Amino acid sequence: MESKNFFDDVYDVVRQIPVGRVTSYGSIAKFLGSKLSARMVGWAMNACHGMPDVPAHRVVNRNGILSGKHFFGSPTAMQELLEREGIGVENDKIKNFKNVYWDPSAELL
């Protein structure tokens, strides 16, 4: 996968997360061959606001917690976007996380 930089690679992966599914910062980093770069994936998600084709709300931490919710304009915006896609959220955590988790390493070949 050739692109301009790491952030562009992250965005390419995030664009492929299906509606109604979520993945983690670490899973994206691992897929991109930088398994220790989960924080850098988080920085990429923070930097992509204003890019409507990058569904950043579908990226959560490894425990299914909406750790990036403060970057969505309001404290409930990330949860609202996920719930519109049929993903349950309770106390800032994805319900049935294992069932809606999408692993790019398994899904993208």
Image: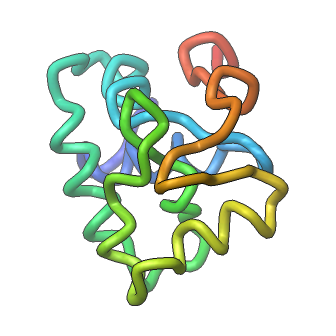
Residue 44: quarter of image: bottom left
Rendered location of residue 67, percent (x, y): 33, 53
Seen at 38% across and 67% down, the residue is 69
Q: Which residue lies furthest to the front in this view?
A: 91
Residue 28: quarter of image: top left
How many numbered discs, if any? 0
Seen at 74% across and 63% down, the residue is 83
> Is residue 23 rendered to the left or right of residue 63?
right
Q: How is the image coloured?
A: rainbow
Rendered location of residue 70, percent (x, y): 31, 73
Q: Note whether 37 is above or below 13 in the view shown.
A: above
Q: Note whether 38 is above or below 54 in the view shown.
A: above
Rendered location of residue 80, percent (x, y): 65, 74
Q: Note whether 43 is above or below 1 in the view shown.
A: below
Split into 4 quadrants, where in the image is the C terminus?
top right
Seen at 66% across and 39% down, the residue is 95
Split into 4 quadrants, where in the image is the N terminus?
top left
Seen at 79% across and 69% down, the residue is 84
Residue 45: quarter of image: bottom left
> Is residue 107 rendered to the left or right of residue 43?
right
Rendered location of residue 101, percent (x, y): 64, 28
99 vs 109, nearest the viewer: 99
> Is residue 40 rendered to the left or right of residue 95?
left
